[in-house]
Image (spheres, grey):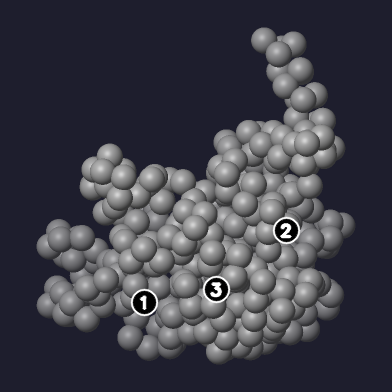
Amino acid sequence: EAALDDAFQTLLTWADDVRDIGIRANADTPADAQTARNFAAQGIGLCRTEHMFFDGDRVDLMREMIFADSREGRAAVLERLLPLQQSDFAEIFQIMDGQSVCIRLFDPPLHEFLPAGKAGMRELADLLDVPLAEVTSRVEDLTEYNPMLGMRGVRLGITVPEIYEMQARAIFQATVACQERGRTLVPEIMIPLVSAKREVELVQAHIEAVAAAVHSESGVDFEYRLGVMVETPRAALRAEDIAEHAAFLSFGTNDLTQMTYGLSRDDAGKFMSEYVKLHVYEEDPFHTLDLEGVGELLQLGAERGRKGRPDVTLSICGEHGGDTAAIAFCRAQGFDYVSCSPFRVPVARLSAAQLALVDKLG
Ligand code: PEP
Ligand code: MG
């Protein structure tokens, strides 16, 4: 078994010498980051930060923040979240040891943070020490008909800028700490669910202000890259002017598929096998990247993005990122890297090498 392991490692090293597209991993936890490292991913292409707030005390803190009715109230909760976020990022930076880490700012569908049922609301009322009726009416206000098309991603970031400010501060303070230990790091900050250039401008202004504050407090120089996740058709169509403010564009093909088809990613599974059986679709587009419709948006977004910024970094970070067909497509479009689940990294490295070899050897 050890010999097989060694042989496989050697094969992967050869594959890395041949391939001409980068392979990163999607990782939100130190354990995922460690797996990414073990499989020699070239950094993290997507760190979903909302996943850091799903558990225990943190979900309570997040709810406290959502339910706070003033800027001061939110700031008090965010102050308690800041050291937790900072240590999340510091740990991941340490594991990745100087490799690129792309952190996506908070992208919750809000319903995932609302209390469930009467019992959940009662618990929250106790936690916040407010009457149950107050919680019930606030949950009613916040409940959306289509949460996946509602107050998500950058929309929340713009409406409640303190959240992204806290995250940016955590990222920069962790970067400064990392640099003080002698390791240079250029963190990448990614804005989710963008559909307009103005959204990027607004978030950029907040992030620049936080960077300037951390710089003057610490006296440490650091750099960072700000980029945009392209996961609405409009972001792909408007990629030229969006890229003026974005060092990188990363295509989130889960949402992009959902929005291109107008098909819920959480419900499609219920009838997709029937659809495929009837040849309405050749494949489940959430499973296999739709190279035609969604692919055309990728191609168009890449072309327009390059018009706005010729050296814009291009990548894909949806679940499709590890598929050979998607890798072939991204490679043909001249993308810089694909990012996939950590366990898919070795096969992605082999697939990318095979594609390069076929091109070379015919
Ligand atoms: C995506 O939409 O493709 C994506 C990677 O983001 P998430 O799956 O977290 O919505
Ligand atoms: Mg998404």
Q: Position of residue 138 (x, y in %)?
A: 22, 79
Q: Position of residue 34 (x, y in %)?
A: 65, 40
Q: Quadrant of residue 303?
A: bottom right
Q: First in sequence: mark 2 or mark 1?
A: 1
Q: Which residue is mark 3?
A: 236
Q: Is residue 362 above or below residue 60?
A: above
Q: First in sequence: mark 1 or mark 3?
A: 1
Callout 2: CB less than 8 Å from ligand 1: no
For marks 2 and 1, give the CA distance: 33 Å
Question: Quick one: quadrant of the C terminus?
Answer: top right
Q: Which residue is mark 1?
A: 151
The three-letter code of the residue at mark 2 reads Gly
- 136 vs 275, left or right, is left
- Residue found at x 33% / y 86%: 69
Q: Quadrant of residue 6?
A: top right
Q: Is residue 164 above or below residue 54?
A: below
Are the residues at dot 2 and dot 1 in contact (C-beta closer than 8 Å)?
Answer: no
Indicate which label's residue lies in the foreground, 2 or 1.
2
- Residue found at x 36% / y 77%: 151
Q: Which residue is mark 2?
A: 334
* Foreground of the two, 299 or 48: 299
The three-letter code of the residue at mark 1 reads Met
Question: Quick one: quadrant of the N terminus?
Answer: top right
The three-letter code of the residue at mark 3 reads Ala
Callout 1: CB less than 8 Å from ligand 2: no
Q: Quadrant of residue 352?
A: top right
Q: First in sequence: mark 2 or mark 3?
A: 3
Q: Is residue 352 above or below residue 69?
A: above
Q: Position of residue 214 (x, y in %)?
A: 72, 78
For marks 2 and 3, give the CA distance: 16 Å
Q: Secondary structure at mark 3?
A: helix
Q: Badge 3, how many Cα within 10 Å: few under 14, some, many 20+?
A: many
